[in-house]
Amino acid sequence: MRLTARDGHILEAIHAFDGVLSDEQIKRLFFTGSSQMQLRMRLLYTYGYVSRPDRRRRASIPTMVFWLTEQGAAYVAGLTGTPVNEFAYRKEPKWMQLTHDLAVNDVRLSFIQACQTSPDITLEEWIPQAEFWAYPDRVEYTLPDGKTGRRFIRPDGYAVVRRGEYVSRLLLELDRATEHNPRFGLEKVIPGIAYIRSKGYKIRFGFNSGKWLVVTTGEKRLQNMKRVTERVAGSNAGLFYFTTYKEITDQTILTNPIWYKAGEDGKTALFP
């Protein structure tokens, strides 16, 4: 098989998106129709550049996904002259968190495509969640009862978005409704504030500024999480913005009022 330039870009994208992309996400990035996407991915699979779930595994997951084989990883590694045995890549999806990882990809794609279609907004950087799992920052913080807590901070992504002279640093937290709201306040909000204010954050990013973007499953849970944040965060509540998965599209994520800012009523846009 002779790889086309687009084939190569698909392999690079799979690696860049923490090692796994769904068929629909590949379509969003590179194709206008499903049949052409399916043909190219079938060829990349047949000739050993990507892997996909077997029939038993496919029956248990919501969508078809692809990840790199050693041959596909060797191609991506070769772009920078890295030997494949020194090249870190995901050899198989983390099946227990696949739904979460694909949701992170969807939000990231909306950021990318929103910036591409906005002439005055630029996505300057995206740090994927795998980077924070490999090299997490640890913070200390004080809980409401006066006790000291310690926690590794692992955002689901970190974006730097610029509009003119205004630069926004955005930390992504995807909520799948698996935790009780009080735990969100103690395990996410208080440590999240401490992280933005920490020395480690400034060393890593050069600034002590940022916003936490929390995406959750529904309006009722969103409002509960917002109230918990306002209660435990106090004057720092404005560091947290909330929306739901269904509100996020390429057209809305940056410039439409789909976000609730903690400490305020009504919705706002990240870039009004």
Image (spheres, rainbow, N blue to C red):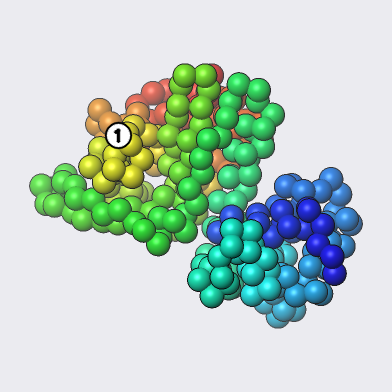
Looking at the image, the residue that sits furthest to the front is 81
Give the residue at x 75% y 75%: 48
Q: Is residue 62 visible?
A: no
Q: Measured along the vertical axis of the image, is residue 78 above or below residue 222?
A: below
Give the residue at x 30% y 34%: 208
Q: To which quarter of the image does residue 131 belong? A: bottom left
The mark total stands at 1
Q: Is residue 265 visible?
A: yes
Give the residue at x 73% y 57%: 8
Instruction: Specify whether 164 is left or right of 8.
Output: left
Q: Nearer the viewer, residue 272 or 124?
A: 124
Give the residue at x 50% y 52%: 128
Residue 22 position, x and y percent, is: 69, 59
Q: To which quarter of the image does residue 244 belong? A: top right
Residue 119 position, x and y percent, is: 65, 23
Instruction: Specify whether 183 is left or right of 216.
Output: left
Q: Which residue is mark 1?
A: 208
Residue 33 position, x and y percent, is: 86, 49
Looking at the image, the residue that sits furthest to the left is 146
Instruction: Specify whether 15 is left or right of 10.
Output: left
